[in-house]
Image (cartoon, helix red, strand yellow):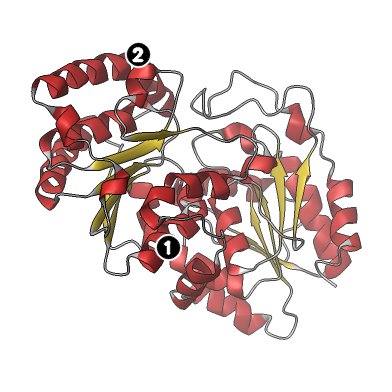
């Protein structure tokens, strides 16, 4: 299904359907089914809802792992989209993954209601909605809380008052904090106290699952002595293509890095990015030491590649968050989205963000959609500037 169509359906029909269900829920005594998180001394079953943004799921991982630390026997499940299944499988704290595929609307709704039936019989204690202000996730929370046993529901508060009534507790979205700390607030009542946000346990689990694909092994075998592999992700996911730094800038930078440092460039990306990356490769005049693995390796094999690489150069995207967790230094480009919210943390990461008058133009309130047709926020970042920064910070020395 087209993403813009989904946004339109969510905006127009989501509130109408949810209000009707809310009235039905009142008739059937849903309000008596909502429990306060404070009523739980132990937590046995937690359901997390996060449909969009595999990178966001990774950024929420410290909060997810905090549940296991306090309640080691708790069963944690997540509902997400099929494209995030591999990312969720990296996090051992998640015991069960429910996933939906958007390609066919009939299959989607058939599986959706089938999952609801399965979830109903599981009887979760907590439902935590990690989506920001989408109506569909709120509707899903509402449906589950109507048909299942009494449970506590937690989600972000929004300008829509009806949406806030769906949750036992609606948490304000604190724009003054990094997204990892914002997610942590949602889980406060499950872990009983504030906790330090760190990626130590997710990092350990993710690296333990790393695999080396045959193409990666060939590259490592051929260039084992140089140890100068740089991964490049020119993609940004289908949520917002405006987050792409221009292809011609990437081409100039890659050629410059090869000439200056003799790097071996490995292009990465998902199956949806294959055509875009192949088009990019065709435009590069010098193809020496450029390897295109886009769409050819799994998430676990991407992690394996990252553990053997020197640097990742990327747009704001899922691979950026994987790299930052496993300890691979990164150079990233932000513009439509703000790095103050989603940027990698730590001195080993450098973010390019011009912070021009119209940035950021996508946010939680416009479903990450923008009317911009000229992302000057990224186009104004010059390859020469990026090259100079890589040299000065000695990323490849």
Against 83, residue 260 (above or below) is below
Q: Earlier in the sequence, mark 1 or mark 2?
A: 2
Please name whichever residue, 193 or 306, is drawn nearer the observer in this view of the structure.
Answer: 193
Against 7, residue 108 (above or below) is below
Q: Secondary structure at mark 2?
A: helix
Please name whichever residue, 145 or 244, is drawn nearer the observer in this view of the structure.
Answer: 145
Asked whether residue 297 is in view, the answer is no
Residue designated by label 1: 65
The quadrant in which residue 305 appears is: bottom right
Marks counted in the figure total: 2
The quadrant in which residue 141 appears is: top left
Mark 1 against mark 2, which lies toward the viewer?
1
Please name whichever residue, 239 or 78, is drawn nearer the observer in this view of the structure.
Answer: 78
Q: Secondary structure at mark 1?
A: helix
Residue designated by label 2: 12
Q: Residue at x 19, y 38 (%)?
A: 112
Percent position (x, y) of residue 273? 51, 46
Is the Cβ of the residue at disc 1 closer than 8 Å to that at disc 2?
A: no
Real-space Cα separation, disc 1 to disc 2, in angstroms: 36 Å
Percent position (x, y) of residue 25? 15, 24
Percent position (x, y) of residue 110? 14, 36
Circle 2 packing at 10 Å, graded few (<14), some (14-19), many (20+), is: few
- Relative side of 197 to 351, left or right: left
Q: Which mark is residue 211?
A: none
């Amino acid at each position: 299904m087209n993403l813009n169509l989904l946004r339109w359906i969510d905006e127009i029909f989501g509130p109408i359907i949810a209000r009707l269900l809310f009235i039905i829920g009142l008739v059937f005594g849903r309000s008596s089914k909502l429990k306060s998180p404070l009523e739980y001394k132990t937590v046995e079953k937690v359901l997390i809802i996060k449909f969009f943004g595999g990178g966001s799921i990774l950024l929420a991982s410290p909060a997810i792992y905090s549940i296991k630390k306090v309640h080691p026997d708790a069963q944690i499940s997540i509902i997400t989209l099929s494209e995030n299944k591999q990312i969720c499988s990296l996090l051992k704290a998640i015991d069960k993954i429910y996933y939906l595929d958007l390609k066919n609307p009939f299959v989607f709704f058939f599986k959706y209601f089938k999952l609801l039936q399965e979830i109903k019989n599981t009887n979760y204690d907590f439902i935590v909605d990690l989506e920001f202000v989408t109506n569909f996730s709120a509707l899903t929370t509402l449906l589950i809380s109507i048909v299942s046993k009494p449970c506590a529901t937690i989600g972000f508060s929004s300008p829509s008052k009806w949406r806030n009534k769906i949750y036992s507790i609606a948490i304000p979205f604190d724009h003054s904090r990094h997204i990892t700390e914002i997610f942590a607030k949602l889980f406060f009542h499950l872990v009983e106290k504030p906790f330090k946000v760190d990626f130590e346990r997710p990092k350990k689990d993710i690296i333990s699952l790393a695999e080396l694909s045959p193409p990666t092994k060939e590259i490592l075998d051929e260039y084992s002595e140089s140890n100068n592999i740089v991964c490049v992700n020119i993609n940004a996911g289908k949520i917002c293509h405006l987050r792409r730094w221009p292809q011609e800038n990437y081409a100039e930078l890659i050629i410059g890095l090869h000439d200056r440092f003799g790097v071996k460039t490995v292009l990465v990306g998902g199956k949806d990015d294959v055509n875009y990356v192949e088009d990019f490769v065709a435009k590069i005049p010098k193809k020496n030491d450029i390897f295109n693995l886009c769409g050819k390796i799994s998430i676990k094999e991407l992690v394996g590649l990252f553990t053997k690489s020197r640097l990742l150069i990327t747009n704001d995207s899922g691979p950026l968050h994987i790299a930052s967790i496993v300890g691979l230094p990164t150079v990233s480009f932000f513009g439509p989205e703000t790095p103050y919210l989603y940027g990698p943390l730590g001195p080993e990461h450098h973010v390019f963000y011009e912070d021009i008058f119209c940035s950021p133009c996508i946010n939680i309130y416009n479903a990450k959609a923008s009317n911009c047709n000229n992302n000057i926020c990224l186009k104004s970042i010059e390859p020469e500037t990026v090259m100079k920064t890589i040299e000065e910070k000695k990323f490849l020395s």
